[in-house]
Image: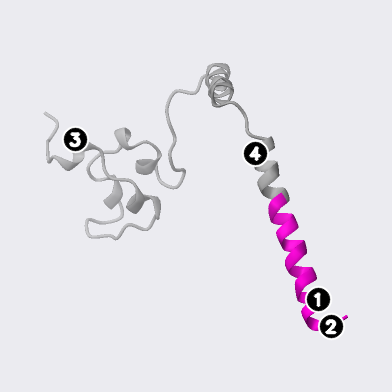
Amino acid sequence: MRRPDRFLLYLGANLAIMAAMFAHSFVSTQNPEQVFAKKIELVKRYGLTDLCIFTEARYTRHPSQADLNTPFQDYPLSFEHFPSGSIIAPPGHLRSGMTHE
């Protein structure tokens, strides 16, 4: 078998696999309402209380539960060492500079 023939065979096999993957994604899609209902049932069954966005640090798990000094718990000028801290913005009450009285 010549080299161009092998390349065409390789290319055809990869295109067939890619077409099968696209076909599978269209066939296996579920109704969004059913997926949402399953998630609601899961929350009720296990008694989940709050959203957990990231699992790295306690101040990125749920932004509303963060306080002013948590990202700098090592020392005041420490750098953010969790990637999720740079992805999500701080909650509004922390950005506005308001203090709790």
What span is colored magenta in the figure? Answer: 1-19
Callout 3: SS = helix
Answer with mark 3 or mark 4, whichever residue precedes in sequence.
4
Where is residue 45 drawn, in percent x and y?
58, 17
Choose between 77 and 13: the one closer to the eye.
13
- Local packing at callout 3 (Cα closer than 10 Å; few below 14, some 14-19, many 20+) is few
Callout 4: SS = helix
Q: Which residue is mark 4?
A: 26
Q: Nearer the viewer, mark 2 or mark 3?
A: 2
How far is the residue under mark 4 from the one under mark 2? 37 Å
Q: Is residue 67 left or right of residue 25?
A: left
- Local packing at callout 4 (Cα closer than 10 Å; few below 14, some 14-19, many 20+) is few
Q: Which residue is mark 1?
A: 6
Quick check: marks 1 and 2 in contact, CB under 8 Å? yes
Answer with mark 1 or mark 3, whichever residue precedes in sequence.
1
Quick check: marks 4 and 1 in contact, CB under 8 Å? no
Mark 1: amino acid: Arg
Choose between 84 and 21: the one closer to the eye.
21
How far is the residue under mark 2 from the one under mark 3? 68 Å
In the rendered image, the quadrant that contains the C terminus is top left
State the predominant SS element of the stretch in magenta: helix
57 w.r.t. 64: above or below: below
Q: Is residue 4 magenta?
A: yes
Choose between 20 and 5: the one closer to the eye.
5
Q: Is residue 97 left or right of residue 76?
A: left
Q: Nearer the viewer, mark 1 or mark 3?
A: 1
Q: Which residue is mark 3?
A: 93
How far is the residue under mark 1 from the one under mark 3? 62 Å
At 35% across and 50% down in the image, what residue appears? 87
What label sits on residue 2 in the rendered view? 2
